[in-house]
Image: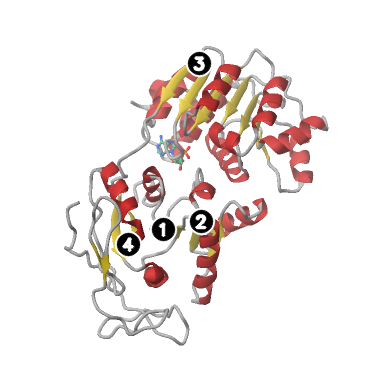
Amino acid sequence: MNFNELNLKKPILDAIRKAGYEHPSPIQEQAIPEMLAGRDMIACAQTGTGKTAAFALPILNQLTVEKKSRIRALILTPTRELAVQIFDNFKKYGRYMRLRTVCIYGGAKQGPQIAALKRGCDILVATPGRLMDYMDRKIVSLDEVEIFTLDEADRMLDMGFIHDIRKIAGAVPKKRQTVMYSATMPKEIESLARELLHEPVDIRIAPTTSPTENVNQSIVFTEKTDKKLVLADYLNQDAVRKSIVFTRTKHGADHLVRDLKRAGIPALAIHGDKTQGQRQSALERFKSGRVGVLVATDVASRGIDIPKISHVFNYDLPEESESYIHRIGRAGRAGERGEAVSLCCSDEMGLLHDIEKMMKQEIPTVETEWSVELTRKKSGGNSSRRGRRNGGAYGRRSGGHSYRKSSYAPGHRRYSKKTSQVSSRVQAS
Ligand code: AMP
């Protein structure tokens, strides 16, 4: 299908062309015609499917009278990062239109947000808490909202926003179009949908179980305690320009950032315990290229759109197999090839098994200086060292290989670069 077949206005089609999109994604193909027909909609789609454009394009298309400067479209989203991202998307797709989009979220100064609202707003992107605050203080009125969108509804419920959502929905005119996006469809979401939506179309985009083709995947079997070494070795390679490192816990993310910094590798953490300001500033520094390594947990990273990632590292394998697909999908965006490297220790063999079973493929093994032999099997696995090391906590000096320019533990030892060799030790599960 072609975007021209979707009945979108010319300025929107021009903006899509400028963004470099060639074809609508499946969710766009299904959702845009329904939204343009004025239907309510519940869509089960994960981030990365193009869901933002799936609601943003028809919203822009439907707000025919430009510069009315009354809030006619409201998008509720759980976090500041997502709000900013949606706002950026509206700017991108609405670049040839004269509609004003304003973004409001907690944890940031109110002055500039209120000033922007006063200048006029056609499309409001908001997190629930901050919007409630402005509603209570009569800074915003939702009396003229025509299209109400709830993005990542499941996450808003997880974050305890249900009461705010109900109040906000109550402040929006009854005669409206309501669209709800959710990555998962638990009972609570279905009942919220019954409450807020009127005869909705139900669109379900199956969760992706196969990885994007433009990402080279590899796995390094190593001891848990050596993961830092393996990672630092990779991060010191010139080809690793911009990377996200995934850890399972917030604590783990903080510790890793600290250790990387000690090793002379600037890194930033992004997770739920960071303030909004800290997360935003980390993201901006990463996006602008000032810091090349972002250490993230799954929850914090969900929905964040960071272009041009060369590498994704799974420092810890994810508990949920589908997270693996989402994580590695961050590399190799927009036609570029990316690399996804997973570090797996013996405790994680069960998780690896689940991931490979879901993808119906085995991830090729890469041998490094700190590799150990692990056997893929159903639950758990055994490790056997491939040779004693003579190093302390930060590994051994590796003779005969090309050394990296920086060392992980200053004064300790340097790194060898063996990480590009794909081992033939891949065993069938
Ligand atoms: P989302 O799922 O909304 O977070 O979008 C994921 C990424 O896909 C974003 O970087 C979008 O800019 C991009 N994108 C959205 N629609 C398309 C499309 N039709 N073709 C190519 N890229 C797209």
> Where residue 200 is drawn, which disc sits there?
3
Residue 413 sits in quarter: bottom left
Question: Residue at image x 31%, y 81%?
Answer: 389
Counting every numbered tag in the picture gives 4
Discs 2/4, front: 4
Q: Are marks 1 and 3 in contact (CB under 8 Å)?
A: no
Residue picked out by circle 2: 249
Front residue of 385/252: it is: 385
* Mark 4 beta carbon near ligand 1 (under 8 Å): no
- Report how far apart the C-alphas of labels 1 and 3 lie in the structure: 39 Å
- Report how far apart the C-alphas of labels 2 and 1 lie in the structure: 9 Å
Question: Residue at image x 60%, y 18%?
Answer: 195
Residue type at the position of mark 2: Thr
Residue type at the position of mark 4: Ser
- Report how far apart the C-alphas of labels 3 and 2 lie in the structure: 37 Å
Q: Residue 348: x and y, percent?
A: 35, 57
Residue type at the position of mark 3: Pro
When the figure is inspected, residue 266 is found, relative to residue 22, above or below; the finding is below
Q: Are marks 3 and 2 in contact (CB under 8 Å)?
A: no
> Where residue 346 is drawn, which disc sits there?
4
Q: Are marks 4 and 1 in contact (CB under 8 Å)?
A: no
Q: Is residue 113 left or right of residue 229?
A: right
Residue picked out by circle 1: 316
Q: Are marks 2 and 1 in contact (CB under 8 Å)?
A: yes
Discs 3/4, front: 4
Question: Residue at image x 46%, y 29%?
Answer: 13
Q: Is residue 295 left or right of residue 210?
A: right
> What crowding class fits label 2: few (fewer than 14 Cα within 10 Å), some (14-19), or many (20 or more)?
some
Front residue of 79/377: it is: 377
- Secondary structure at badge 2 equals loop
Discs 1/3, front: 1
Label whose residue precedes the other's in the sequence (3 or 2): 3
